[in-house]
Structures are given as C-alpha cells and as structure tokens.
Image (cartoon, grey):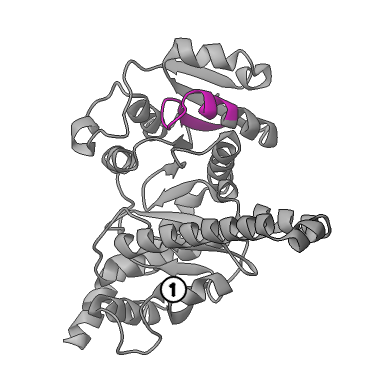
C-alpha cells in the first residue's frame, strides 16, 4: 500500500460498528478508486462483514486489535493503551503508513490520542474541530466545535487561519469570508478575548477576507464562509442549528398530515421537498476534522449510517490528496501569530 493513498480506519468505533463502518468504507472505495484502506479491529468480525464486499477486500488490509475504546471511557483511561483499534489506527498515520485516520468513536478519546500521538503543528497552540454545514445559498465551515471549551485571543486567531485554509480546500472558495461569532456586530459587544482576536487577525496581514463579527441568526443566511468561535459556544451553536433543522422538518410533516389540501398538493411539491431534504441531510455533512495536528484525523458521527460514514471517509481522502496539513504549515511560516498577539495585547493594555 506504500505507493497509494492510504486511509486508516478505526473499524470498531461508533454505535453500530464494525458493520456500518465497513459498509461506509465500501461506498467510499467506489467513489475513490485511488484510495486504499487499513482496517483496525476484531479481525474475525471485520472479515465476516468484509467478505460481502469483494471490491473493498481487494483494496483493504485488516489488522487485528484486541481492545476497543468505548463511548463511556474517559480519555485519561485509554490515552496510553496501544492495543485499541483507535490508537492503532491513529498510530498508522504517525508511522507514515496512512495519510489520514477516520473514527466514529469516543470524541474525547480521539482528540486526546491524536494530540498525544500526532502532536500539534509548530506554532499552533491548540487543535480545533471543524466541520462543514449548509446555509441558504451554499455551505460554510465552523470551528471550534468542542475541542476547547475555553479559548484566548491567540487560539481564536489560529482557528481563523486554519478555518480559512480549510474552506479554500473544501468549499472551493478562493477568498473565504471569515467572521468571529459574537452576540452583536458592535465593537463594544462580546468578551474581551473576541475583541483581541479581531485585532490580531486585522494586523496579521494574512490573505484573509476578515469581515468582523457575525451573530448566530446570520449564520444560515450565508454571510460568512468561516465561523470562528470557542468550543463551548461552537458546540452549542451546532447542536442548536441541527435541532432547529429537525424541528422544521417535523413541523412540515405534521402540517401535511393534518391538512387535506396539503396532501392533495404534495405530489406537485415532491421535487422541492426532496431537494430541501437533501440539502438538510446531516449525513451529507458528516466528518469533522481535527485541524492543527501533524496528521489528518476525521471524526464521524457515532450514530451515522453507511452513507454518512462514507462521506467522512471521502472527506479524509480529499484532504489527504490535497496535502492539507502541509498547506497549514506553509501558511504559518509567513506570519508569527504568537509574536503578533503579544504586540496587540501590549497595545490593548
């Protein structure tokens, strides 16, 4: 596999592993014929399912792991256990056997093991979790989504830099609009670290279209391509958006059931309804990346189905193919955000 694009898979991670994982990888393999896969997990269980997918079996190698990271496990309890499928899959990236790792397992453990094993990129203080979401006219990326509940100004500025690069690669936007999530657009509103982050970004002279602050209700309108925030606020915002989307779909279904006229007109609106459903389908946006590490780690939703998992794997393939980590390193060489932040903070105080 050394002469191919290789993706390492934690086959035992997720609510319905290894079945959904293998099914998802099989779908991704058809869409990415240049990719090969290392499957880490209980070899007997994995091979039993893999036998049903001969096309995947030709491009996959199963590597046995004797232990599994469970959803209830604390990161501190599993972080140094080298016998789990999660650790072995991540370590394959460190050893250069794979260009990316995908897991639907315990998020805290995945972040902890990835950070310990792969280390953060030089000049990056904290990695962040970033994902793609739909808005009214297209898509946007948001970070951090839970890796860091508390962030200072420098952390937010680094997230803006990484989010800008991520958006260029995933959204095909040459000059993404970057915004800091805040409770208002006015300069005096919000916490001090947000104000300081804005000053650092403005003075960084990066090739970045920084548009200032964005309020939560403006996100779905497509005002920005990159939304930057701390992990606590980002996780709440993400779950609120997902919950609202589910509510809208449920209300529409209930309204149709209660109205005879709505049922009568349903066939005429079927195409529109299917298009909206596809746009809002969370499976099509599955696969959050942990940016800022010396390697690609992609987190799939633990409860997703095969289609959702295949999207996460395809995202990993695309970013690995584009050498995303090297791009971040190159961008960081152009500016010293650490030194710049000290200058800005000195000016503030």
Indicate the quadrant containing the N terminus: top left, top right, bottom left or bottom right: top right
Left or right: 299, with 48 as reference point: left
Question: Magenta stretch containing residue 218, yes or no?
Answer: no
* Residue 11 shows up from this direction: yes
Identity of the residue drawn at 48% across and 23% down: 18
Examine the image and state in which quarter residue 35 appears. Answer: top right
Question: Magenta stretch containing residue 8, yes or no?
Answer: yes
Identity of the residue drawn at 58% across and 42% down: 311
Identity of the residue drawn at 26% across and 59% down: 149
**x and y percentages locating residue 256 in the rendered image:** 68, 58
Residue found farthest to the left: 349
Answer above or below: position of 53 versus 326.
above
Left or right: 67, with 283 as reference point: left
Dot 1 falls on a residue whose secondary structure is helix
* Magenta-drawn segment: 4-23
Disc 1 crowd, CA 10 A, few/some/many (<14, 14-19, 20+): some
Answer above or below: position of 110 versus 322.
above
Q: Nearer the viewer, residue 50 or 88?
A: 50
């Amino acid at each position: 596999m050394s002469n191919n694009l290789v993706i390492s898979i934690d086959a035992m991670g997720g609510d319905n592993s290894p079945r959904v994982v293998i099914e998802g990888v099989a779908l991704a393999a058809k869409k990415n014929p240049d990719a090969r896969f290392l499957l880490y997990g209980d070899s007997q269980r994995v091979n039993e399912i893999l036998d049903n997918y001969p096309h995947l079996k030709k491009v996959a190698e199963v590597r046995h792991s004797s232990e599994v990271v469970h959803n209830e496990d604390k990161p501190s309890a599993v972080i140094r256990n080298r016998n789990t499928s999660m650790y072995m899959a991540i370590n394959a990236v460190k050893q250069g056997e794979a260009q990316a790792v995908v897991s639907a397992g315990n998020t805290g453990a995945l972040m902890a093991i990835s950070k310990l094993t792969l280390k953060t990129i030089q000049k990056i203080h904290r990695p962040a979790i970033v994902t793609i979401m739909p808005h009214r006219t297209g898509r946007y990326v948001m970070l951090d989504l839970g890796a860091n509940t508390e962030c200072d100004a420098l952390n937010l500025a680094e997230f803006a830099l990484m989010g800008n690069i991520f958006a260029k690669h995933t959204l095909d936007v040459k000059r993404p609009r970057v915004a800091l999530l805040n409770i208002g657009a006015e300069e005096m509103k919000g916490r001090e670290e947000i104000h300081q982050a804005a000053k650092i970004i403005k003075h960084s002279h990066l090739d970045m279209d920084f548009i200032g602050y964005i309020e939560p209700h403006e996100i779905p309108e497509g005002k920005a391509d990159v939304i930057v925030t701390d992990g606590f606020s980002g996780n709440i915002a993400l779950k609120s958006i997902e919950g609202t989307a589910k509510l809208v779909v449920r209300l529409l279904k209930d309204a149709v059931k209660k109205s005879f006229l709505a049922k009568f007109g349903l066939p005429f609106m079927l195409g529109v309804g299917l298009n909206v459903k596809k746009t809002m389908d969370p499976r099509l946006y599955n696969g959050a990346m942990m940016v800022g590490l010396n390697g690609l780690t992609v987190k799939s939703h633990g409860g997703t189905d095969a289609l959702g998992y295949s999207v996460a794997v395809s995202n990993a393939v695309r970013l690995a193919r584009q050498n995303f980590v090297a791009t971040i390193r190159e961008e960081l060489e152009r500016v010293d955000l650490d030194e710049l932040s000290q200058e800005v903070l000195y000016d503030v105080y």
